[in-house]
Image (cartoon, rainbow, N blue to C red):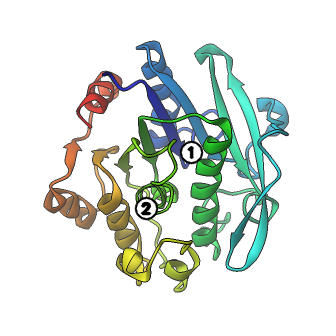
Amino acid sequence: MEKKRILYISQEITPYLPESEMSEIARYLPQGVQERGREIRTFMPRYGCVNERRNQLHEVIRLSGMNLVINDTDHPLIIKVASIQAARMQVYFIDNEDYFQRKAVIADKHGKEFEDNDERAIFFARGVLETVIKLRWAPDIIHCHGWLTSLVPLYIKKYYYNDPLFSQSKVVYSAYNDDFKNTLNPNFNEKLLVEGLSTADVEMIKDPTYVNVSKMAIDYSDAVIQGTETINPAVKDYIKKSKKLFLDYQSKDSYIDAYNEFYDKV
């Protein structure tokens, strides 16, 4: 049976953020795949630099109002939605005052990376998956774009696998040239533990560097795509050694069909 439902989780999507290879793929790939007869849902964080009025974001009250506990603190989950009219697609935004109000994405205007990027990644991954559960929408494929989505494969394979909505889901991870420079919070591996996850499951990120975070995402994914022409050499090497189903970098004019066909192999 052909896989029909694809969940896209992306660190950035244009026009909500400036154009980059990742934000363009995350914008045009869901549209292209939807036009080829599949059903899609798309999620990104609601960073403070996303203009709510211009992009007509509004809160989805029936989905909001949950709390996610991270590091023993309650963080309210707010879900917003906007439409890209030309593409006939909706984008869901994960919002929270503590994590996503600041006017920048991963680093401040001086290039200093945010110290809570680890918790932002946890909140984003779990926020998306909890929202999908509320939507009662079972994805066949979950396609993750950008390191901020790197915990989704782990949570799907180790935490949500008992949930009937995700029991058949396969995870595809796209690796980009989106390296962060500083190591994440040293307690990252402990903070992301939830019931059913052991420290052995997250051994890879005892030292939470960009490369190790990427390796863990690859470990728990079913397939990997190289999203940009160049990626971190250590990550590329690890993908090769992993023997995972792999799709090499695809040019702008052919990637939608290539990705769409790749989904059927996963």
Return the x and y of residue 116 as percentages of the image width and height: 65, 73
Observer able to see residue 60: yes
Observer able to see residue 113: no
Looking at the image, tell me whether mark 1 or mark 2 is earlier in sequence order: 1
SS label for mark 1: loop
Residues 35 and 86: in front is 35
Residues 233 and 196: in front is 196
Q: Residue at x 41, y 42 (%)?
A: 169
- In the image, which disc is placed on residue 12? 1
Label 1 Cα crowd, 10 Å radius (few <14 / some 14-19 / many 20+): many
The vertical placement of 209 against 51, above or below, is below
Quarter of the image for residue 74 reads bottom right
The vertical placement of 265 against 113, above or below, is above
Nearest to the eye among marks 1 and 2: give it: 2
Return the x and y of residue 184 as percentages of the image width and height: 52, 77
Left or right of 111 in this view: 245 = left
Amino acid type assigned to the residue bearing label 1 in the image: Glu
Residue placed under numbered mark 2 in the picture: 154
For the N terminus, the image quarter is top left
Label 2 Cα crowd, 10 Å radius (few <14 / some 14-19 / many 20+): many
Amino acid type assigned to the residue bearing label 2 in the image: Leu
Q: Residue at x 55, y 49 (%)?
A: 11
Q: Which residue is drawn at 41% across and 35% down?
A: 140
The vertical placement of 186 against 239, above or below, is below
